[in-house]
Amino acid sequence: MSATMESALKARMARQEGWNRPPHVEPEGEGELLELSMGPHHPSTHGVFRMDVSLDGERVIRLKPVFGYLHRNHEKIAEGTSYLASMPYTDRLDYFCSLTNNWAYALAVEKLAGQEVPERAEYLRVILAELTRIQNHASTIGFLLQEMGASGTPLMYAFREREKIMDLFESLTGSRLMCNYMRFGGCRVDASAAWLDQAHKVVATIPEFIDEFERFLRSNEILMARTQGMGVIKPELAVNAGLSGPMLRCTGVGYDIRKVDSYGIYDRFQFRVPVGDHGDIYDRYMVRMLEMRESVSILNQALKDIPGGPVMDPKAKIRNFRPKPGEAYGRIEAPKGELGFYLISDGGPNPYRYRVRPPSLINLTILEDMCLGHNVADVVLIFGSVDIVLGEVDR
Amino acid sequence: MLGEGIIKGMAETARNFFGSFVSKERLITVEYPEQRIPTFENARVFPFLVYDGADWEAGLRCVACQICEKECPPKCIYIEKSKEKKPDYAGKLQIYPAKFDIDVSVCMSCQICVEVCPFEAIKMNTEFELATDDRFGGLLLDRQKLARSNEYYHSIHPTEAAEVDARLAEEKAKVEAKAKAAAEAAAAKAAAAAQAKPTDTASPKTDTPKSGTPQSGGEGA
């Protein structure tokens, strides 16, 4: 290595050192620290997740996230079964957004096998992914407000909307949550004209719901007092930690894989990427609200333009699917961030290596940086604003 | 003014509360055991085996090819092949499942078995109230418990079942045409042989029942 390169590397490492280490918080006054184990069965943890917290009074001095309680061996199971048989397992990663999981996996396999996707299937994928994004953001905000103490009402309003979208999913794919809808080279079944009509009707009611939700909470003093300036992430740290999705965009970094990669047919739609400014919980909340509005606009365009035709590549094989040897990484902008599937094929019926890049896990890694110096009650809020699903964190 | 935002939010809640007395669409709760939402046509819960005709055992479409057993992601299907053969819907002699069990406590309702089945023999049911107090025997369904008639399939998935029936009829016609052609060719060959050797009449007699039996069996099944 040349001397200039070495010095550049050293300078870069010195610059990064401050970002990579969590800020040090000193306890105030005398006395011992209180070690508290929050979880794994804590109502605020959205599943089974534990935080080992060291407290000085109410202030958090240290926080260690402990995960793995829901480990189900997803990646190893996928290496032992056929490509198709992993598809229903991907539903169970992030069980709020099974359709985007399906899409990411299908995209990776399509890259691996060099398959084409028919036009209509691409449109259906976009429609379903955006519906998924809306219902995920709505319920995330609902859960966040529940953790803030607004017990029930906002969550029920969010779930009322979610239910309409779930009904759409069920009538098309057969299941509310575990949709298992996308296949390598298209989608499993075609959407009827009646379904598209119904989707039109549901999408038309969503802006009204978002308006209602904003009137309901946007200027709420309690919400603002508890979220503004809380759990701040700096853009440098966010980029260095590999955050993605609303967690990254709330810091002001306008990185959206729909724009950067324009996978599928996202380059055909007009939409904006909302970014925050402060990187606090309120910005994350607002970014999600605005993303729902953008999703509605994408949905309106997609439902208007959807062409006819087949939904499945006629050359696609269901049985005896063996992609040629090689590797592929397919990534999409899932509601929670960048969801990627990395596959290596050795030409056999099952993948040689199968790896998921879960947005929830990677967004969770900077939990300590966000929580230090705040109170225990705020840890619950900060954790809720990360928007994780433990099925995806532990896999 | 401090508290203005909270009051605005409360007004929204009140609008929803009083609105539910006026507009029916705000009342979204369904009181389940008494009221029921009809299931969607595409809904899927657990698989069942389709049979044609009146007798479930004779009419099972399954030929125990074991593709679903291999492809099933959680491996909840257990199949044992039969020793002897029986005629299927098109009249071909096929193996049938001597044992076909599905453990519905393991099944994850993914519909992969339906997609990979080349014989349209396994389909998804929409029945969801399967609670039982027997956690082992009650959840391991054998082929008799799994068998449902084609009429039942038509009643739960009408569009899909009509497509399947059309496809099966087409295949049956193809098989029958092939069998007929084969029989005719055999007859012609036999006639030619008979013309060449007028004394030897044994071969056409043995040929005719061979091609005839599966056809009649197919109509019966």
Image (tube, grey):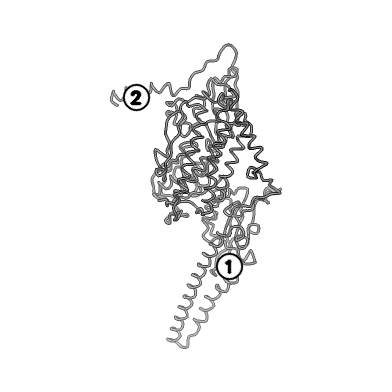
Q: Residue at x 43, y 56 (%)?
A: A314
Residue that carries the numbered disc 2 in the rendered image = A9
User: Where residue A211 sits in the image (x, y, percent)?
Assistant: 54, 36
Q: Residue at x 42, y 28 (%)?
A: A240
Q: Amino acid at mark 2?
A: Leu
Kindly indicate the quadrant of the structure image that contains residue B62: bottom right
Q: On the picture, is A225 further left or further right than B18? A: left
Q: Around disc 1, counting alpha carbons within 10 Å, would you say few (fewer than 14), some (14 to 19), or many (20 or more)?
A: some
Identify which residue, A169 or A369, lies in the foreground.
A169
Label 1, secondary structure: give it. strand
Residue that carries the numbered disc 1 in the rendered image = B86
Task: Confirm whether circles 1 and 2 share one chain.
Answer: no
Give the alpha-carbon distance from disc 1 to disc 2, as whole Å.
75 Å
Label 2, secondary structure: give it. helix
User: Where residue A33 sits in the image (x, y, percent)?
Assistant: 59, 17
User: Where residue A227 sits in the image (x, y, percent)?
Assistant: 54, 26
Quadrant housing the C terminus of chain B:
bottom right
Quadrant housing the N terminus of chain B:
top right
Q: Residue at x 53, y 65 (%)?
A: B166
